[in-house]
Amino acid sequence: MDISSDNLQITMVSSPGMGHLIPMLVLANRLAADHNVTVTVLQVTTAVSPPESNLLHLPVDDNLVQIIQLPPVDISHLIDPSTKVVTQLCLMVRQALPSVRSAIAAMDRRPDALIVDHFGTELLPIAAEFNLPKYVYAPSTAWFAALLIYSPVLDREINGQYVDQTEPLRIPGCKPVRPEDVVDPMLDRNDQQYDEYIRMGQEITLFDGVLCNSWPNLEPKTLESFKRNEHMRSVMRNPVYPIGPMSRPVQPITEKTELISWLDRQPDESVIFVSFGSGGMLSAEQTTELAWGLELSRQRFIWVVRPPTAGRVDDAFFNITNGSDSAPDYFPEGFSTRTGDIGLLVPMWAQQVEILNHPSIGGFLSHCGWNSTMESITSGVPMIAWPLYAEQRMNAAFLAEEAEVAVRPGVLPTKAVVGRGEIERMVRRVMEEREGVKMRENVKRLKMSGEESLRIGGSSYNFIYEILKVIASKKSHK
C-alpha cells in the first residue's frame, strides 16, 4: 500500500557494529517491500575495523535501499583503555555528525524523514536544520525503551549506585528492574557512559516517536503504559510504536553445507544450538564447564565456538575436528571424541537464522542479544538465557519471567562461573522436561502472533503505515 504515488524517501543512520546495522537494514527492507519507501542507510564506520556491511548475509532491495558508508571516524585521541563501549559508540557518532550533515545536504532529493538508532539522538539539530520529521529506532524491547526514557527521572530520584539498591527500580506501568539486571551504562554512575546514557534518555523524548522491536502480544503491559499511564505519559508524550518482530529472513539454501547436512540427519527438535553472537566471549574456565555440561546432558548440540581470550586465534582453534582430540586445550580431554556422534563444533560463525529454522533444532543457548532473541522467537525455539553485556540481563529476565520462553542460570554468568551441573539441568529442562514442553508451546504462540502482526492489517504493518502517514502529511505541508 503506497502512501502516495510519489513514494517517500527516508534516511536512516546506523551507529557502528553489526548488531546495530542489522536491525536498521531489516527495517529498511520492510519499509521498501511493504510500503514502497526509498531508504538510504548512512553507516557510521571506523578506521580500525572493516565495514560491517561487507560481512552481512542480508540482501537488500537494490531498487529502493541504498547503503552509504560514511568516512571512517577516529576517536583514538578521545579514549583510553578504560573507556566503555557505550561511550565509544557515542563518541563515534558525535565525530560523524559533520559527515551525516554533508551526506544529507548532497542528496539530489532531500529525505522526507530521518530515523536514527538510540546512539544517534544527537542528530536532533541536523533534523531541525533540514526540517525533517525524526524518529528513534531502539531495536530492543519496549521495556528497554521504557527504562531509557525514564532514566533521567531515576537519576533525580535515586541516590547512590543503582546496583546497591535493595529494591527494584520502578518504571511507571512496567515490570520493575532488579538492580543486578540494569543495562551496562547504569552499573557505574561515575563513569562517562552513564552521563551519555542519561543524555540519550533526555533527547529521545524530543523525537516525534520511538520505534521498538516488539509487538502487543509480546509486551502488552509495557506498551499499555506508554498509552495509558499518566506518569509515563508525562515523560514520553510522543508515540512509541511496536513495529516488531523484525528479524533477518531465512535465506534459501542453494548448497548444503556439512552443518546443514548434519542437521538433516537429526530427529525433529532434538538439537540445542549454542552461540553467543558476534561479540560473545567466555572465559577458558567457563568454556570448559559449558563443554562438560553439554556432554553430561546427553543432548545433541551444535556449538559455535569462539576462543576464550581476545588474543590471537591460533591454528589449533580453527582445526577443531569433531570426533578427534585436536581441539584446543580449554575443552575437556577427550571431549571431541566422546561427543563426536551427538555434537558438532563450529569455529567462529554459523548460519544462525537458517540453523534456528531447521526442524531438528529444539533449543537455543544464547547471550540474549535482541537480534538473536527475535530470530529464536520467530523460529519457535525456546531458549537458555545466558546474558553477557548491554541490555541482555533485562532481556533474560523478560524471557524467563514474562514471556516464559526461557530458563536462565541462578547466578549471572558475568559474576560467577556457571557450573557443569547447572548447565546440564538447564539443557535437560528445555530439551526433555515438562517445563521445556510448556516453553515450546509459549514460543510457538508468540511466533504465530508475530507473523500475524507483520501481515497487511497486522499491528506492525499498521504502526509503520501510521508513521508514514504522518511523514507524508508533513511533506505535503512543506
Image: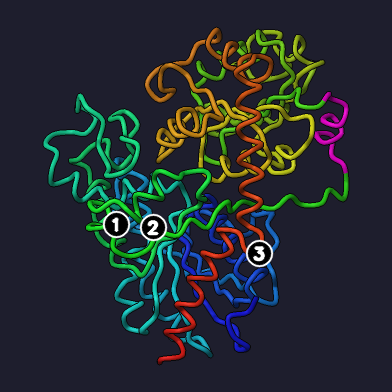
Q: Which residue is mark 2?
A: 118
Is 264 colored magenta in this rendering? yes
Work out whether mark 1 precedes mark 3 in sequence or the reverse, and give the earlier one: 1
Q: Earlier in the sequence, mark 1 or mark 2?
A: 2
* Count of numbered circles in the view: 3
| Side of 188 where 64 appears, left or right | right
Q: Which mark is residue 18?
A: none
Q: Position of residue 226 (x, y in %)?
A: 35, 54
* Mark 2 crowd level (few <14, some 14–19, many ≥20, 10 Å Cα): many
Q: In terms of sequence position, does the residue under pointer 2 or pointer 3 come before the other? A: 2
Mark 1–mark 2 contact, CB under 8 Å?
yes
Quick one: SS at disc 1? helix
Query: Circle 1: is it few (<14), some (14-19), or many (20+) Cα within 10 Å?
Result: many
Which amino acid, by three-letter code, is at mark 2?
A: His
- Look at the image and name its color scheme: rainbow
> Marks 1 and 3: CB-CB under 8 Å?
no
Rendering coords of residue 51 (x, y %): 56, 59
